[in-house]
Image (cartoon, rainbow, N blue to C red):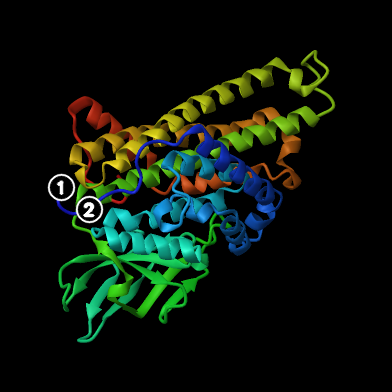
Amino acid sequence: MSAGFVRSPWTGHADDVELAHWSTVAEEVADKLDPGALTRDRESELPASDVALMRDSGLLNLVVPATAGGAGAHWETAFQVVRRIAKADASVSQVLGYHYLNQACITFYGTDEARQLEWFARSAAENWLWSDSFNPVSPDLTLEHDGHVYLLNGRKKFATGAAVADVVLAGAEAKGGPRDGEFLVFAVPRGRAGVEHVDDWDNLGYRASASGSICYSDVVISQDDLLGTDTGEPFSAVVTPGVQLLFGNIYLAIAQAALEHARTIINARPNAWFLANVDRYAEDPIFQRLIGELVARTSAVEALADKLNRRFDDAIALAGSTTAEDRAAIELAIAELKVVATEVSLEVTSRIYDATGASSTASRHGLDIYWRNVRTHSLHDPVEYKKIEVGAHFLTGAVQPVSLYT
């Protein structure tokens, strides 16, 4: 094992009992989220009550090690949970998925086993929801020592979930003081003086995801807030493929939910197109062919996602022994999923209207929420660059520079 990260608390794979149990929990939560999802989206509600629902269900401590008071579940389980909840509400699912990956930064950036367990134990005991403010397209935050303490300043856009989180991750290069020149990663607790959540999220989709900006004004950052230092060690960079895998699972779930909704609409129609020579729309071979094509493509994405969800457990178990080659391998595999999940989900959520007909555009159906959500979030990072990422490696063996997008 290389110097740096001591260990990963995640080893092995989920068994059938674990997967079945948490699938049932996720199903119960999703059933409660589903009825109000469209209203929450249209009213751009903060997901405070939804977070409370997930907190009460035990989902926030899903991947916290059992030795620290958590459920000790695997990442395959976490991604399946996120996917099930995304079928009910993609906004809420995004908040939960980010929570898991931000909480895992305790391990990605922590180098002391006792300190890691302390962070996990605190999170489990207080049932924390984690968020972050790492958006790389916003200006860097500043962390300057004033002679006594470090002060954090700056603004980050698209801080999904931060307005309802218990802790928000941030990072900045320390200027002056005892950690001068180090890029520190730290957790800012809810209610810390100088933190402001700005309600400036007014986008086409993901409207209930609490994705507004966060502003820091002379926020005191102490040693107690520190998770670790980003030294560029390969294991720390595994978090980004994890984020991309999260996206692929959510896009898949949106497509699945759109197809299920379309099926309900089609089966409820009492007649058929006058040239079809059948009694009901569901019996029209034109619509059967279209839906069959979309279902088949979505199933192919599901098979790839399932494979990579399980493989991510292998990648994260490497911990401090992770090499650049290990990290590149999981990055590239997940990039393939990102390409097909994006394109299939966009296709499904648009073409289902061809099968459901003009009446399905009525606002009461809410069929537009699927396209709006995937269209909005799939622009997070251009999928064309994911294609280049995959194609360049296939042709020349090139690997793109490590970043918060690759």
Residue 360 spot, x, y in % from top left = 73, 37
Question: Callout 2: helix, strand or loop?
Answer: loop
**Residue 380 numbered mark, or none:** none
Query: Is residue 159 visible to us here?
Result: no
Looking at this view, name the residue that lies furthest to the bottom: 147
Name which residue type carries label 2: Phe
Q: Is residue 152 above or below residue 379?
A: below
Q: Quadrant of residue 392?
A: top left
Q: Nearer the viewer, residue 154 or 147?
A: 147
Residue 4 spot, x, y in % from top left = 18, 54
**Residue 2 numbered mark, or none:** 1
Q: Quadrant of residue 387?
A: top left
Name which residue type carries label 1: Ser
- Name the residue: 31% across, 73% down: 224
CB within 8 Å, label 2 to label 1? yes
Residue 9 spot, x, y in % from top left = 34, 49
Q: Nearer the viewer, residue 287 or 41?
A: 41
- Name the residue: 25% across, 40% down: 327
Q: Residues within 10 Å of mark 1 (few under 14, many from 20)?
A: few
Q: Nearer the viewer, residue 200 or 141?
A: 141
Query: Is residue 51 visible to us here?
Result: yes
- Side of 113 where 307 appears, left or right: right
- Name the residue: 83% across, 18% down: 279
Q: Residues within 10 Å of mark 2 (few under 14, many from 20)?
A: many
What residue is disc 2 on? 5
